[in-house]
Amino acid sequence: MTNNLFETIAMEWLEESRFRLSASSYSKYEQCIRLHILPCFLGMKIGDVTQELLNSYIGNLSSGLSNGSRRIIIMVLNNTLSYAYHKQHTKKLLYVRPSLKKDSRVVRTFSEDSQRQLENYVLENRENVPSPVLFALYTGLRIGELCALKWSDIDFEHASLRISKTVQRVKIWSEEAPVTSLQILPPKSSSSFRLIPVPDFLLNYARPYRNGIREDGFIFSGSPVKPLDPRRLQYSYRRMLDRAEIPYLNFHCLRHTFATRCMNLGWDMKTLSEVLGHSDIQVTMKYYFHSSFEYKQSQMNKLMLL
């Protein structure tokens, strides 16, 4: 039986997993280990960890944690335990069984009236760069994908848009003040690398902003070297909603709104899934199989007395 400490094994597993993880996932798992796992297993030998101890630890996790955070903790813990067993650091293969209810996901979208009001505000208050809000409403791109777009990613001739990167603020571990770094990374998954068609009106809207800007320049920051910070975009978006007197929904709801409108227009699920960059059509169905209330209402009003 090994005398290696649990904390050593956990960090070894993390380092060996680095090549498989995105920078943001690595950062998330490191934060999870340092903040939520190691404090409870500090100084403990891996061979002294028991099933009873693990069950007690999971049962006593802070009630302030979301189910999503708990799932990450359990996943990281199980991967560490499996790594320890297969590397022969311990003779016991232990496993923590997740027993968490799945969070019910409610897709929130802008009503047609609110969307129209938002679009009018964007078109009446033009700035020096195209509006990422308008692009989100009519391409369904994630906020990081939008921030990473360069003019070279738009093919005006073939009315298409290439998504090959994303911008994220990645947390860097520090025992002092939290530190983040703005990074341009590969997209969320292999399916997120995609080429999507763009509606003609959106190209016509964007084309005048292209004049005199280098192809390698970022579309929404107006800079040739620095992308728009998603955090800054979220701030300006919230301010836009306030000024337009539209009830607040987070930026990701623009993507939900796009997808729901496409469903209501009769898009098939496979096409929508590919445009959104989902890894599986089941993900698309899980979120958008149910149509909007407005669509349900329009269908209901087709009923008439016999």
Image (cartoon, rainbow, N blue to C red):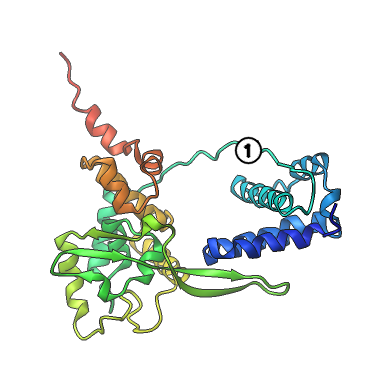
- Give the percent coordinates (x, y) of residue 27: 60, 65
Report x, y in % for residue 304: 17, 20
Q: Nearer the viewer, residue 24 or 1?
A: 1
Q: What residue is shown at x 19% (from left), y 69% (from top)?
A: 155
**Amino acid type assigned to the residue bearing label 1 in the image:** Leu
Q: Position of residue 54 (x, y in %)?
A: 78, 44
Instruction: Check the image and report above or below for 260 versus 202.
Output: above
Residue 67: image x %, image y %? 61, 45
Which of 131/244 is in front? 131
Task: Kindly identify the residue that appears in the image at 27 percent across and 71 percent down.
Answer: 153
The part of the image, by quadrant, that contains residue 291 is top left
The front one of 220 and 280 is: 280
Left or right? Give the position of 274 relative to 26: left
Q: Nearer the viewer, residue 209 or 119?
A: 209
For the point 82% across and 59% down, the residue is 5
The residue carrying mark 1 is 100
Label 1: element kind: loop
Label total for image: 1
Q: Residue at x 37, y 61 (%)?
A: 241
- Is residue 114 visible in the rendered image? The answer is no
